Amino acid sequence: MSRENEQELLKLPIFLQFHFKFLRFSLAAFDEFHFALDSMTAHKKYKYIIENFPLIIQRSKQENIASLLNVSQEILSRIRSEIY
């Protein structure tokens, strides 16, 4: 959707209401995700991501997942071998 189309839709009260609800939901999920990751070990973080955000695991490169977990790719390989 182009920015212009979005701006036109935001003039409609029903779309504006939907838009705000969607933003609140997205921010809450983002906040929960980061809070959870900050308080877990790398092993638990990986399990949490598998259970709650499987597309991240499926679509991301191993180096990006390792970076998200704040571990090396070697440590990520060990975590993956323990889980699978």
Image: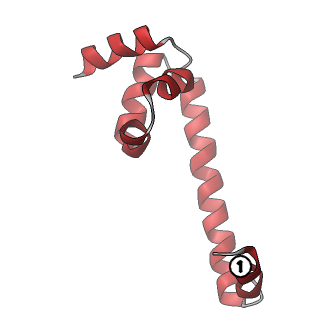
- Quarter of the image with the N terminus in it: bottom right
Residue furthest to the left = 84
In the image, is 56 to the left or to the right of 15?
left
Give coordinates of residue 53: x percent, y percent: 42, 43
Q: Residues within 10 Å of mark 1 (few under 14, many from 20)?
A: few
In the image, is 7 to the left or to the right of 29?
right
Give coordinates of residue 46: x percent, y percent: 41, 26
- Quarter of the image with the C terminus in it: top left
Q: Residue at x 26, y 21 (%)?
A: 83
Q: Quadrant of residue 81?
A: top left
Determine whether 10 is above or below 76 in the image: below
Colour convention of the picture: secondary structure
The mark tally for this picture is 1
Determine which residue is flagged by label 1: 6
In the image, is 17 to the left or to the right of 48?
right
Q: Quadrant of residue 78?
A: top left
Q: Residue at x 62, y 77 (%)?
A: 18
Judged from the image, the secondary structure of the residue bearing numbered disc 1 is helix
Give coordinates of residue 39: x percent, y percent: 57, 23
Q: Looking at the picture, which amino acid does disc 1 mark?
A: Glu
Q: Residue at x 45, y 36 (%)?
A: 60
Residue furthest to the bottom = 12
Determine whether 52 is above or below 40 in the image: below
Q: Residue at x 71, y 83 (%)?
A: 5
Give coordinates of residue 66: x percent, y percent: 49, 21
Q: Nearer the viewer, residue 75 or 28?
A: 75
Q: Nearer the viewer, residue 11 or 41?
A: 11
Q: Nearer the viewer, residue 52 or 7?
A: 7
In the image, is 12 to the left or to the right of 63?
right
